[in-house]
Every structure is written in C-alpha cells, then in structure tokens.
C-alpha cells in the first residue's frame, strides 16, 4: 500500500458515530444531512426511469438534458453559464476529486482555507500534492479570513487555492469583496481556484451566497464544485456537477477523467436530478427557510448556556461552537454521546484549527429535537 494512504487519518466523526449507529436513545446531529427524505416527485422520476429500463451506460459528462438544465439553473443564479461548461459527477465529493486530479499532482502546492470538511484536504494529499493550511480566525464565535495572510501564502508556485464557502463546519461565507481580491490575486500568481460551493443555496442573507461564478470570466482558472445532496435533500443519491472554464480542452480532459473514475453517473439518478431541478424554485427556498428557523432556534438556545461561545452562521447547516475549558473535542464528543446520548461531531475532525469546538448539524425536521439536544448538553455541562 502507498504510505500516503496508510497515513491518511480516519474520520473522527465516524470514530464517535459508528459506536452510536442504531442506538435508539441517541439524538444524532453528527452527520451533514437533513433527516427529511428526498421529495416524492424526485424519487418517482428515478422509479419511472428504472421501469423504462434505463439501465445502461450514459455519456461521460452526463445526459445532455441534465447538463442543459444545470446550465439554465446556474445561469439563473449567476448569469451567463453555458451548458458546455457543465460536467455531471457522481456526487460533490467526486466533483472535487476530479478537480484535484485535473490540477494537482505529486509535489504541487495546494493552499486550503481551514478548518474544513476533511475530504477536501485528503484529496490532494492522496494525489501526492502538498497541502498548505491557512486558518480562519474565530472572534466571539464567528470565523473570519485574514485576506493579507492568504494573499501572502498564495504565491506563483501555488497550483490551487481550495476554498469552501459557505463553509463546513464553521458556516463562514466569503464576501463578494473578498472573492474579488482573491480572484485578482490568483490571476496574478497563475493559481487555480477550486471553489466548493455546495452550500451556496443554504444561505440566509439572500437567494444565494456570493459565488466566484458571479465575478469570474469563462476563461478564468476557476472550477466550481456542486452537489444535489444538500439543497435537494439527495445525500444518498450521489449526484453533483462541476462548472468548468470554457478554455478549450478542459472539458474534454474532465470527460477522460470521468471515464477512468466512474465512467458516468447512473441514468436513473440523473433523471432524479432533472426532476429536482424542476422543483428548485419552490423546494430550495422551503428547505433554506426551514434551516434558518432551525439555526435561529438552536443558536438562541445554545447562547443561554454558560461557557458556550456561538454565533449564528450566515450559511450552511451547522452550528460550530466552543465550550470554555473543554479543549479536547474528541473526548467531549465521546462523553456527550456515551453519557448523555447526544451525537455531535468533534471540531478536531476538521483539522487542528477546529480543536476545542463542536459541530452540530441543525437540519432537523422537528425543531423539538434541537431543544431536546440542547437540554442534554445543558445537563452534561452542569
Ligand atoms: C463542504 C462539502 N463539500 C462537498 C460535500 C459533498 O457532498 P456530496 O458528496 O454528498 O455531494 C460535502 C458533504 O458533506 C461538504 O460538506
């Protein structure tokens, strides 16, 4: 086995959660998904596809009608996105891996803004790239980027700047002004931007979080990764997409990589994606409005607890909070789970920058579950 793979850290969320799966007394808030199943019309579209016998390979880049629908959906949000820039992938995580395979090889430098969902930094490491971590800074429970610092760290030898905003786990979201500075800087250094924007619609300040697609030209070195998982309640379907630069050769290269990775996304899953996009105008605002209610309820309740530092995040589905004098997040998460039946993700799962913090996924259909969870936390903290 390659030493790089042996040395990859195992998921710390799993370290806590695997022991609790199937335990009915546990209130689980550790994984990044809603407890609401995929809406019926989306499931129906997949069932009808299977009933029609759509069980064959498809185009590497995705069904043309799905690419067209994604192109129209993205153009509606960001203007001027041609469907020729879209590649359909078997999940957001696969879109991100394909972006890394396209751009970063052994010895290349990837600068990542952290803390972040650990898959993002593991992917370049798997490919032999060198990952430089640049930390967000927490002030009063809210997280901020030091723009001067990131511009100092991204140099002409940096191959990729990797950003996830709205961010998992912190909820931190890039502002338009920050995106402009970063794009201008990366144009100067010749650095690619890989933007993980899977939470762009789970944003509480408007229809959509600021996106690099709003400001980049089609020729800029910007790749954006997307997913059906979060905004369409489709985590188990494994469907996502990439928005690529229009530069000749890029999409064909991704088509080759897709062939060697998954060959194509399953057709019945793509049909479900098409149905989901048809519902986007009503479904996504409904999901986001509910998430905002969840966030407000949870954060307000957490703020009443002594020793807890938390601020409402502008986007995403997580409350990331600190408990004073509790510096070992893995030990605290294990204690909350074993002694109090409360399932949270330890901040250390997102890198050393998240140590001392806990992540709570608030995507709960029943707001009462959040109240019950806060009561368990209150009992645990005395
Ligand atoms: C930041 C971030 N990016 C990408 C993904 C990928 O989602 P999926 O692979 O389910 O499409 C996730 C899932 O949790 C995530 O948190």
Image (cartoon, grey):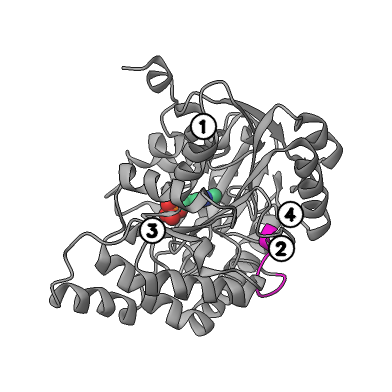
Question: Of helix, strand and loop, which one carries label 3?
Answer: loop
| Residue underneath mark 3 | 61
Instruction: Give the mark, 2 or 1, whose residue is nearer the N terminus.
Output: 1
Which image quarter: residue 113? Answer: top right
**Does any atom of ligand 1 lie closer than 8 Å to the CB of label 2?**
no
Q: Please give the residue where the numbered disc 1 appears in the rendered image.
A: 124
Q: Nearer the viewer, residue 296 or 86?
A: 86
The answer to whether mark 4 and mark 2 are in CB contact below 8 A is yes
Q: Does residue 142 belong to the magenta stretch? A: no
Between marks 3 and 4 in the image, the one whose residue lies nearer the viewer = 3
Residue at the (76%, 44%) spot, across then down = 187
Q: Which residues are magenta?
A: 205-213
Which of the two labelled residues, at mark 3 and mark 1, occupies the earlier sequence position?
3
Q: Answer few, some or many: residues within 10 Å of disc 3's Cα (few below 14, many 20 plus, some between 14 and 19).
A: many
Q: Which residue is mark 2?
A: 210
- The span from disc 3 to disc 4 (Cα, nearest Å) is 29 Å
| Residue at numbered disc 4 | 174
Q: CA distance from mark 4 to mark 2?
A: 7 Å
Q: Position of residue 54 (x, y in %)?
A: 18, 70
| Residue drawn at (71%, 63%) of the image | 210
Q: Determine crowd level at label 4: few under 14, some 14-19, many 20+ residues with C-alpha closer than 10 A.
A: many
């Amino acid at each position: 086995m390659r030493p790089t793979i042996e040395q990859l850290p195992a998921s710390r969320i799993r370290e806590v959660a695997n022991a609790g799966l199937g335990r009915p007394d546990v209130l689980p808030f550790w994984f990044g998904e809603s407890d609401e199943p995929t809406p019926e019309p989306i499931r129906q579209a997949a069932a009808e596809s299977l009933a029609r016998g759509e069980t064959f390979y498809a185009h590497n880049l995705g069904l043309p009608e799905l690419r067209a629908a994604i192109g129209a959906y993205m153009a509606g949000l960001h203007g001027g996105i041609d469907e020729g820039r879209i590649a359909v992938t078997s999940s957001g995580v696969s879109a991100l891996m394909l972006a890394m395979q396209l751009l970063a090889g052994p010895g290349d430098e990837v600068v990542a803004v952290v803390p972040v969902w650990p898959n993002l930094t593991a992917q370049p490491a798997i490919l032999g790239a060198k990952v430089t971590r640049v930390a967000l800074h927490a002030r009063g429970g809210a997280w901020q980027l030091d723009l001067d610092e990131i511009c100092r760290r991204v140099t002409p030898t940096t191959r990729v700047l990797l950003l996830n905003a709205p961010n998992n786990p912190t909820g931190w979201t890039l502002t338009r002004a920050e995106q402009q500075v970063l794009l201008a800087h990366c144009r100067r250094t010749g650095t690619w931007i890989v933007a993980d924007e899977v939470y762009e619609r789970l944003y509480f300040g408007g229809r959509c979080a600021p996106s690099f697609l709003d400001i980049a030209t089609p020729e800029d070195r910007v790749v954006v990764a997307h997913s059906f998982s979060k905004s369409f309640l489709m985590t188990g379907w494994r469907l996502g997409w990439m928005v690529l630069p229009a530069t000749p050769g890029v999409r064909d290269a991704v088509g080759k990589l897709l062939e060697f990775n998954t060959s194509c996304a399953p057709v019945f899953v793509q049909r479900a994606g098409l149905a989901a996009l048809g519902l986007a105008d009503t479904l996504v605002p409904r999901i986001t409005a509910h998430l905002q209610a969840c966030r407000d309820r949870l954060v307000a309740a957490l703020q009443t607890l002594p020793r807890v530092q938390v601020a409402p995040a502008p986007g995403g589905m997580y409350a990331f909070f600190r408990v004073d004098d509790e510096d070992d997040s893995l030990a605290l998460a294990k204690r909350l789970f074993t002694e109090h039946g409360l399932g949270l993700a330890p901040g250390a799962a997102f890198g050393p920058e998240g140590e001392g913090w806990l992540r709570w996924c608030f995507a709960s259909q029943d707001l009462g579950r959040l109240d019950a969870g806060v009561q368990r936390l209150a009992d645990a903290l005395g």
